Image: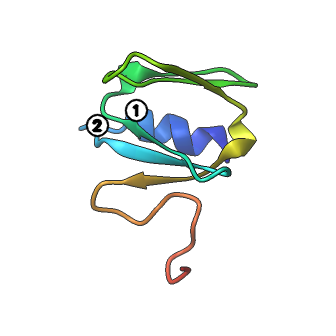
């Protein structure tokens, strides 16, 4: 995934929680932008429920599903 789409979702005002869908089928819930850090080569996501840490390659992020919107990275009308 293009990191700019992720950064835009993190900076959105007001912020809207979203789900990151990964290539292996996992879903990471992002309730607040403070739980995600990005660099050129990695994305770090903290799960606030159990304080687990996921360190990801950006290419493993397939899409973002923002509450009340079309998943980022998928054109409208695509399934």
Disc 2 and disc 1 in contact, CB within 8 angstroms: no
Q: Which mark is residue 11?
A: 1
Q: Which mark is residue 3?
A: none
Give the vertical position of 21 relative to 31 (above or below).
below
* x and y percentages locating residue 74 in the rendered image: 57, 67
* x and y percentages locating residue 37 in the rendered image: 53, 20
Q: Which residue is located at x 41 percent, y 21 percent?
A: 35
* x and y percentages locating residue 27 in the rendered image: 49, 46
- Side (left or right) of 71 relative to 44: left
* Residue neighbourhood size for the residue with mark 1, other residues' Cα within 10 Å, grouped as few (<14), some (14–19), many (≥20): few
How many numbered tags mark residues here?
2
* x and y percentages locating residue 70 in the rendered image: 41, 66
In the rendered image, the residue lying farthest to the top is 51
Q: Which residue is located at x 72 percent, y 33 percent?
A: 57
Give the vertical position of 1 relative to 58 (above or below).
below
In the rendered image, the residue lying farthest to the front is 50
Tell me which corner region of the image, top left, top right, bottom left or bottom right, holds residue 46.
top left
Q: How is the image coloured?
A: rainbow
Q: Mark 2 — residue?
A: 15
Q: Which residue is located at x 37 percent, y 26 percent?
A: 33
């Amino acid at each position: 995934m293009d990191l700019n789409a992720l950064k835009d979702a993190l900076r959105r005002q007001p912020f809207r929680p979203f789900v990151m869908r990964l290539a292996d089928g996992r879903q990471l819930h992002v309730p607040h932008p403070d739980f995600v850090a990005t660099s050129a080569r990695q994305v770090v996501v903290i799960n606030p429920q159990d304080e687990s840490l996921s360190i990801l390659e950006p290419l493993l992020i397939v899409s973002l599903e923002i509450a009340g919107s079309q998943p980022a990275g998928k054109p409208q009308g695509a399934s």
